[in-house]
Image (cartoon, grey):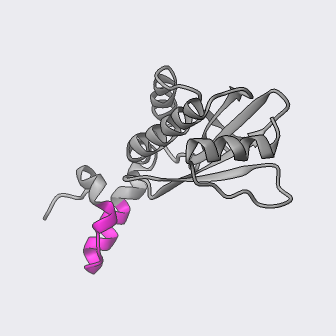
Amino acid sequence: MTKNDLIKLLDEAGIEYDAPEGKDFVAVILPGTRRLKTVALLIPGQNYLRIEAFVCRAVEEKQADVYRFLLQKNNKTFGVAYTLDANNDIYLAGYLPANLSPQDLDRALGQLLDRADNDFNRMLEMGFEESIRKEWAWRLSRGESTRNLEAFEALRPAEE
């Protein structure tokens, strides 16, 4: 698959993309609800299409619980799976056949977005619990907005 083949496939699927000149990838920005957006990189290869997206930086705590959660999600996802880089940052990645249909590409991107968006808050809640608790306390003590912490209401300190 070439980059031009990939662009044609994206056009056929009606998927918006950014294809920077001189780069070997095409970027697709997937809007989310829990996670503002997920940027998927599509990297064509000779007989495959690699798809990958950064999901979350390396977790600070409960690594085993987070990794177990991610591995259990891998069993239910088409085309992509959770993986770690050398820094333990969390990605979704996979290889698809070069001859995939526009519908298959759309499905794989949908799965990637579904996983990244639906699993994101749970990853943060488990992997950054203490930091989130401290952030709640700091903002409440100063009267700061807690709007973007609403998803983590369960970690809010008890009223004194």
User: To which quarter of the image does residue 109 belong?
Assistant: top right
Screen quadrant of the N terminus = top right
Would residue 35 appear left or right of 154 to someone viewing this image?
Answer: right
Which residue, as the protein is rendered here, is positioned at the far front? Answer: 12
In the depicted structure, whether residue 137 falls above or below residue 19: below
Q: Residue at x 43, y 54 (%)?
A: 35
Is residue 88 visible in the rendered structure shown here? no
In the depicted structure, whether residue 23 falls above or below residue 71: below
Which residue, as the protein is rendered here, is positioned at the far top? Answer: 75
Which residue, as the protein is rendered here, is positioned at the far left? Answer: 160
The magenta-colored residue range is 134-149
Residue 62 location (% of width, % of height): 46, 38
Screen quadrant of the C terminus = bottom left
Residue 18 location (% of width, % of height): 67, 58
Q: Identify the main secondary structure in magenta.
A: helix
Q: Nearer the viewer, residue 47 or 141?
A: 47
Residue 2 location (% of width, % of height): 82, 40
Is residue 129 visible in the rendered structure shown here? yes
Q: Residue at x 29, y 79 (%)?
A: 142
Q: Nearer the viewer, residue 122 or 45?
A: 45
Residue 138 location (% of width, % of height): 33, 71
Q: Residue at x 57, y 29 (%)?
A: 104
Q: Residue at x 49, y 20 (%)?
A: 75
Determine if the magenta segment contains residue 152.
Answer: no
Q: Nearer the viewer, residue 74 or 152?
A: 74
User: To which quarter of the image does residue 93 belong?
Assistant: top right
Q: Nearer the viewer, residue 128 or 57?
A: 57
